[in-house]
Amino acid sequence: MNNNKVYLGDCIEIMKGLPNNSIDLVFADPPFNIGLKYDNYNDKRSYNDYYEWSEQWIKETHRILKNNGSIYIAIGDEFAAEVKIILQKAGFYFRNWIVWYYTFGQNQRKKFNRSHTHILYFTKDKEKFIFNGDEIRIPSARQMLYNDKRAHPKGKIPDDIWEYSRVCGTFKERLGDHPCQMPESLLERIIKTSSNIGDIVLDPFGGTGTTAFVAKKLKRNYITMDISKKYYDVIEKRLKGQTEEIKRNSNHTHREINRNLTLFEFENV
Ligand SMILES: C[S@@+](CC[C@H](N)C(=O)[O-])C[C@H]1O[C@@H](n2cnc3c(N)ncnc32)[C@H](O)[C@@H]1O
């Protein structure tokens, strides 16, 4: 199998070509079926179509993951409950329902502002899986506030509410006009926790290539893919460090990028 590979094409077909029990960690950030504007993917499918499609790609991730592998799926309110059930039905074991909390671009008038995305964390085996707690410890209140001698000197394992800013149009990290580029810091936590150096991390929905980029930075191998040639090119360039070229090729203003980022909040106002 070719480690460190970016594919252009449909993730289900590509995963079907990968061997059983070959991947250590899957991170997936599928389109949420909320009508976002992607290059060549229709993000407004019928409920049943989206549900059945989710079953198909999640089934493939289960087959290709090693027995001690883990999967994290980012998903919106609209399908979080369904995706959790699909993961369980596929044979995965539930670890955490993580909430990624952010405060950017909320503009509701007749309901509460949305400020989160769900990240469902499951493992293939109930007991045997990688969890490098010491890699991701953060300062605890016992240490910082109470000066408690019983506090773990390296801090505590983070809670299941994760606060990271979304990647706004003006951020240095932002690469062009993809509607949902994930923050690198969020991927860092996931990859450090659930994989080791030299492991293979797979992302079926590459987008701008955040997962592959961070995996490479952390000395993991990566496999990723996207159905769009435009995004595929962005991933290849990002992995080669050609970020300025990606930004030059994007003809969208910061304002347009931010408008697209907040599209789903505006849509339901
Ligand atoms: C939510 S975005 C991923 C963003 C990514 N996490 C990032 O940080 O840039 C989902 C991506 O899935 C891609 N996509 C949609 N259907 C796909 C399919 N069947 N196979 C592979 N990629 C697909 C879209 O083109 C889009 O770029």
Image (cartoon, helix red, strand yellow):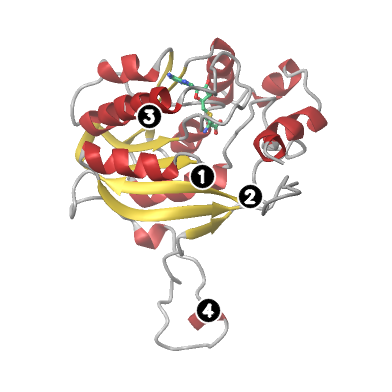
Asked if labels 4 and 1 touch by Cβ distance under 8 angstroms, the answer is no
Residue corresponding to mark 4 = 141
Question: Measuring 65% from the left and 49% from the top, which residue is drawn there?
Answer: 165
- The label on residue 267 is none
Q: Where's residue 68, x and y in %?
A: 21, 44
Q: Where's residue 141, x and y in %?
A: 52, 79
Please determine whether, in this image, residue 184 is positioned above or below residue 180. below
Asked if labels 2 and 4 touch by Cβ distance under 8 angstroms, the answer is no
- Nearer-N-terminus badge (3/2): 3
Residue corresponding to mark 2 = 114
Q: CA distance from mark 2 to mark 1?
A: 9 Å
Which structural element holds mark 1?
A: loop
Does any atom of ligand 1 lie closer than 8 Å to the CB of label 1? no
Crowdedness near tag 3: few (<14), some (14–19) or many (≥20) residues, C-alpha within 10 Å: some
Which structural element holds mark 2?
A: loop
Question: Measuring 75% from the left and 46% from the top, which residue is drawn there?
Answer: 107
- Is 214 left, or right, of 84 in this rendering? right
Q: CA distance from mark 4 to mark 2?
A: 28 Å
Asked if labels 1 and 2 touch by Cβ distance under 8 angstroms, the answer is yes
Quarter in which the C terminus is drawn: top right
- Nearer-N-terminus badge (4/2): 2
Residue corresponding to mark 3 = 51
- Nearer-N-terminus badge (3/1): 3
Q: CA distance from mark 1 to mark 4?
A: 31 Å
Quarter in which the N terminus is drawn: top left
- Nearer-N-terminus badge (2/1): 1
Which structural element holds mark 3?
A: helix
Amino acid carrying mark 1 in the image: Asp
- Mark 3 or mark 4, whichever is nearer to me: 3
Residue corresponding to mark 1 = 77
Q: CA distance from mark 3 to mark 2?
A: 23 Å
Question: Measuring 64% from the left and 44% from the top, which residue is drawn there?
Answer: 166
